[in-house]
Image: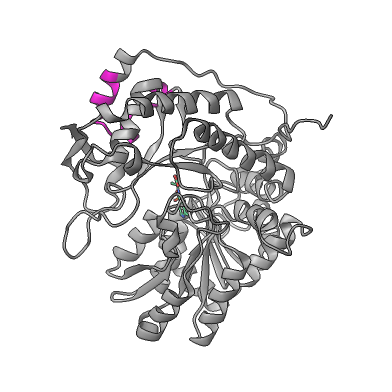
């Protein structure tokens, strides 16, 4: 008999979690103004709000922390981290930052000017925010198929080369660079193929433009290339990673995802002029160049995390858990962005809460219902997150309206996945009785979903 699959690690330390009653949750979510970001973590049983900074570090990472060199300048830990990044990506210049959005802030301060256009594939909200706050435009060139949640495509995060080509043909002089997000978080944790990265490179070269990879989940992207793209089955994850970055000019990184640290990020590039330009903003915003917002100990943990998480077994354990949750949802007929993404399942709220009008935010409503059902905290990646159009100030209802259930790395077991699936099924079974959603009582102008306050309609 073939042996079943099991995790490539065992557990050395645990953190107790607590269930609650529905009455408690009713009160807590009301006090949180129906915004799950305003819940306290003790009010949550299983936390799927993000996979960012919520992973479990390995014993090797914890051990590395003891070697942290906290020198203000020239710390050994910086050079350890830089060496690993050089080796994995081929990028010579490295600037640490406190997290991914800080990397965006520092690099875009150098590169993005008012009136610019930055084409890409479903820019993440902080990426979009850092472009739009500079009075520039984030132009989404994702393939149209990504919008059909039921379509099974191996690389649903891809850039549409025709859309990108058109953007460059029409606006080349206003385009400072192209940004490709791997994996494409907003489209459902969907990967980008090597073939697509090659196409983007070719188009960029034709117009003399550079390419940035938003690399928060680059290792998961490499796993999908290995397991789905022809010609890569026998390549190691590290070989695939090196090839991906060979097609780019630089990267912004939120190390809280595929670096498996709780906080951290960086910029890396092969171009001295980008490094010199970004340097000027790192010092005032983040800190001196050899720490830029990170502790020495965290840089040590990140160096190990990057190395470990570019090994196949670790990624295989992780992605299979997400696929396990997806298989449970399939059993219950619950629609989500297909196929299952790398870090999360994106449940298609607009196909479930069909009686809730879009003006009342179906995905946010589903997020609230799932929390009430079992204390599970997902988050809306939908109409609230999409913010208003910066020009018309209208809500943007053009995209998908999803409930994202993130799976933190090396944290929960498949028993937890079962609880999530059944809780969602219970909500799904009473979906037709849910007819009203929420209305916005207060919102910030930009990135409103973190602080928005809502009222039940
Ligand atoms: N880029 C992508 C693709 C991301 O998913 C994130 C963060 C960032 C950049 C910004 O990085 O949080 O370190 O500043 N995503 C988290 C999430 C917050 O929940 O998806 P950060």
Q: Please state if 2 lies on the left or on the right of 406 as rendered.
A: right
- Does residue 144 appear in the picture of this structure? yes
In the rendered view of the protein, which quadrant contains the C terminus?
A: top left
- Across and down, in percent, residue 102 comes to 44, 56
Q: Residue at x 20, y 36 (%)?
A: 438
Tell me which corner region of the image, top left, top right, bottom left or bottom right, holds residue 238: bottom right
Q: Please state if 338 lies on the left or on the right of 87 as rendered.
A: left
- Across and down, in percent, residue 6 comes to 73, 31
Dominant SS type (magenta): helix
| Relative depth, front residue between 362 and 2 | 2
Residue lying at the far right in this picture: please name it: 1
Which span of residues is magenta-colored? Answer: 26-44
| Relative depth, front residue between 154 and 277 | 154
Q: Residue at x 50, y 19 (%)?
A: 17
Q: How is the image coloured?
A: one colour
Q: Is residue 30 magenta?
A: yes
Q: Please state if 140 lies on the left or on the right of 315 as rendered.
A: left
In the rendered view of the protein, which quadrant contains the N terminus?
A: top right
- Across and down, in percent, residue 256 comes to 53, 46
Q: Please state if 28 lies on the left or on the right of 12 as rendered.
A: left
């Amino acid at each position: 008999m073939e042996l079943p699959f099991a995790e490539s690690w065992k557990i050395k330390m645990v953190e107790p979690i607590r269930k609650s009653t529905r009455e408690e949750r009713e009160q807590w979510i009301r006090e949180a103004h129906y915004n799950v970001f305003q819940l306290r973590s003790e009010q949550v049983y299983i936390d799927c709000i993000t996979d960012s900074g919520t992973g479990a570090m390995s014993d090797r990472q914890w051990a590395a922390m003891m070697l942290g060199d906290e020198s203000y300048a020239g710390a050994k830990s910086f050079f350890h981290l830089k060496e690993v990044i050089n080796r994995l990506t081929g990028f010579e210049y490295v600037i640490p930052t406190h997290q991914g959005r800080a990397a965006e802030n520092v690099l875009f301060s150098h590169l993005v000017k008012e009136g610019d256009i930055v084409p890409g594939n479903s820019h993440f909200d902080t990426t979009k925010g850092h472009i739009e706050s500079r009075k520039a435009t984030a132009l989404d060139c994702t393939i149209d198929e990504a919008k059909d949640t039921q379509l099974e495509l191996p690389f649903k995060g891809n850039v549409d080369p025709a859309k990108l080509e058109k953007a460059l043909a029409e606006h080349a002089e206003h385009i400072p660079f192209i940004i490709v997000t791997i994996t494409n978080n907003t489209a459902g944790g969907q990967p980008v193929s090597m073939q697509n990265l090659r196409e983007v490179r070719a188009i960029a070269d034709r117009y003399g433009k550079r390419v940035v990879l938003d690399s928060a989940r680059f290792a998961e992207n490499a796993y999908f290339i290995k397991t789905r793209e022809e010609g890569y089955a026998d390549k190691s994850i590290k070989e695939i990673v090196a090839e991906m970055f060979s097609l780019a000019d630089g990267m912004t990184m939120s190390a809280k995802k595929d670096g498996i640290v709780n906080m951290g990020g960086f910029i890396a590039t092969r171009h001295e002029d980008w490094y010199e330009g970004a340097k000027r903003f790192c010092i005032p915003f983040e800190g001196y160049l050899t720490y830029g917002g990170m502790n020495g100990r965290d840089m040590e943990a990140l160096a190990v995390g990057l190395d470990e998480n570019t090994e196949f077994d670790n990624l295989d354990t992780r992605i299979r858990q997400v696929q396990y949750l997806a298989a449970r949802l399939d059993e219950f007929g619950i629609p989500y962005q297909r196929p299952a993404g790398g870090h999360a399942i994106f449940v298609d709220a607009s196909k479930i809460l069909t009686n809730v009008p879009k003006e009342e935010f179906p995905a946010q409503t589903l997020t609230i219902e799932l929390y009430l059902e079992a204390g599970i905290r997902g988050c809306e990646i939908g109409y609230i997150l999409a913010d208003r159009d910066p020009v018309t100030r209208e809500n943007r209802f053009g995209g998908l309206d999803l409930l994202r259930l993130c799976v933190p790395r090396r944290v929960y077991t498949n028993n937890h996945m079962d609880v999530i699936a059944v809780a969602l099924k219970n909500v799904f079974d009473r979906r037709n009785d849910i007819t009203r959603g929420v209305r916005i009582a207060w919102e910030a102008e930009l990135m409103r979903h973190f602080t928005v306050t809502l009222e039940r309609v």
